[in-house]
Image (cartoon, rainbow, N blue to C red):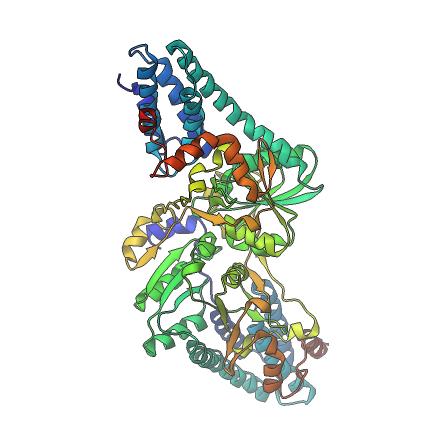
Amino acid sequence: MEIPVKVLKIADGIKTMRIRGAGKIARAAAEALKIAALEYSGSRDEKSFKRYMARVADLLISTRPTAVSLPNAVYYVMYRLLTTEDRFDELRNTVIRATEQFIQESIDAVRKIGEIGAKRIPDNAVVLTHCHSTAAVSVITTAYRMGKIRKVYSTETRPFFQGRITMRHLLEAGVPAVQIPDSAVRYIMHEVDQVVVGADTIASNGAVVNKVGTSQVALAAHEARIRVFVAAETYKFSPSTAIGELVPIEFRSPEEIVPKEWMEKYKGIEVLNPSFDVTPPEYIDAIITELGVIPPQAAILVLLDRFGWALSKLKQGELGKIVFEETLEE
Amino acid sequence: MSSFEEALARNGYSIGLTSSEYTLEFIEYLAKNTATTRNYKDLAILFKNAVRKLELERPASAQVYNLLRDIGLIISEGAEDQVDFETTKNNIIDALDIWRNRVIKECEETAVIASHRLVNGDVVLTHSRSICVLKTIENAMKQGKRLEFYVPESRPGMEGLATAIKLNEMGFKVRLIVDSAVRFFMKNITKVLVGAEAVAVNGAVVSKVGTSLISLIANEARVRVFVVAPTSKFSIETLFGELVELPEGDWRRLMTPDILAKLPENYRARVPIYDVTPPNYIDGIATEHGLFAPQALPVILKEIYGSWPPKAPSIEEVLEKIDSIIG
């Protein structure tokens, strides 16, 4: 049976970055799997349904090869499907339940991270955050409601100025926030009590891949003996790094930094725009997940707990990723 | 301004004067206003205004403090020794001429010395915009050295863009990056070269904000950091325990009002202009007298002033003497 149009639309949305942000991508993928299961009208036998879902899973994963939340959402659902032996109706229900559960857990995660992280913020704290992270903002605003936050410094975060989004969220929640340029991080660090940032991907050794600049914020904090907390949902942990895969760093368009006309006029100047950098685990004091606080070096614990099945599959494969259609052939 | 420069300006692109350029402009300001003075009182008022102007515009500029100290002493000593006014006036004009040449000459001599530290194949990161750094690179080019550059935007102001353009015109391979990407690229870099607004007596360097972060990152990666700073940028004030005053700006340094209008009403920004790089992150300060460890600054000051501590009054002391002229 053909993959439903609604599913293809979501896949396209993820591919073209109309759907963006790790959490939104993961929930969109889960939603797409749910729709695929609901709209399945092929032969009502167990094997055909599994094969069909495997094709949908592979399609979704292929849309953003570097995203981590996306395959993790798919693993979450497919693990439950592939390890269930039952009648077709039950299998379909398994998929629908798993997708709904994933979406709910993902939404709850931000709130839980906020509650857990806020406890770690000392009283009367000045917090510094980089870029915009829903999880980090959740920690800060929760701590603010507990009366713990005196002030927040938010970096502009060039080239895209995500710091302005952070400012909006913080100010709307009543948090006294002040913007600084990215270059002023070390200058301001002596006033800061705590650094809280989000994460894009967490590697199996506890290294944190996040918006470029995070690693130098963490370095400046480390120099000043200021603690650095990373707020991250468990679906940010990357199973493929456990088998030695590197996290690819995307270079985005130079036009985010200077206008096209500028580049045309100064053709000889190469404008480089890496999106992310890697903060080594030794500069991170704790990662706050919805399951609890863990030291970064214990990241593998989360991976085994949440994606143990995917890890064992990845170890068998050679591509560093799971191809679900092939998995079925075994 | 072309349309794309306007687009950049909306998000804070605004090329300010370098430290040396500001000093040269200040010399012209003093020359112009000295010409219209008629007596010691006029000179005293001019001097007080000049100190106020500096405190308002660029309180971190050690070079202009040093310039003003020289001029203030000519005025106060002239009045004290009852030197004829016209003679004193001419002495000031002469002193300004000497300073005009000194700023350029010291910068050039410093650049020659600093250029010797660059070697063929170096990949250099330089921050913001500095005349003495550009002269250093010109010298290295004349010596036939093959160099490549990384330049951060250097917000606020984004003077890095102007530096990138200049280096590219000189024929070098240049890569422009955002300030946040310095640590990402540090593994590709072999040397960091920066200018200075002031050098404190302990060897700490006041420079464009971001310099201290870059130096920290370089230190972590064991990349050497060199500062190009003629001795006229050494802050005598810090010898007397003064801190170099670091001015800050607000949102105006980051955007135009139309961008601000789209942000929340209570949006607030703190925009430091300079920061302080501690001496332990600096491998060498190049001066016209040679290249030395930042902590060796007292040795050089002794060389220049002939004694330690230098027999130079603080600007406050000069101001007191000037006040007594006005009476």
Counting labels gives 0
Which one is in front, B40 or A103?
A: A103
Q: Quadrant of the N terminus of chain A?
A: top left
- Where residue B31 sits: x, y (%)? 51, 77
Q: Residue A46 appears in which quarter of the rendering?
A: top left
Q: Is residue A141 left or right of residue B215?
A: right
Where in the figure is residue A141, as x and y percent of width and height? Answer: 61, 34
**Left or right position of A172 against B185:** right
Residue A212 falls left or right of residue B279? left
Q: Residue at x 33, y 31 (%)?
A: A323
Q: Is residue A174 visible?
A: no
Rendered location of residue A278, percent (x, y): 47, 48
Out of B110 and B316, give the one closest to the viewer: B110
Name above or below for residue B53 compared with residue B68. above
Nearer to me, B223 or A186: B223
Q: Residue at x 68, y 69 (%)?
A: B242
Q: Is A266 placed left or right of B33 in the picture?
A: left
Residue found at the very far front of the displayed protein:
A330
Q: Which of the pair B239/A46 is nearer the observer?
A: A46
Determine whether B188 is above or below A163 in the image: below
Q: On the image, which quarter does residue A64 sit in?
A: top left
What residue lies at 65% left-to-right and 78% top-to-bottom? B41
Quadrant location, the C terminus of chain A:
top left
On the image, the x and y values in percent for residue A35 come to 37, 17
Q: From where the camera sits, is residue A114 visible?
A: yes
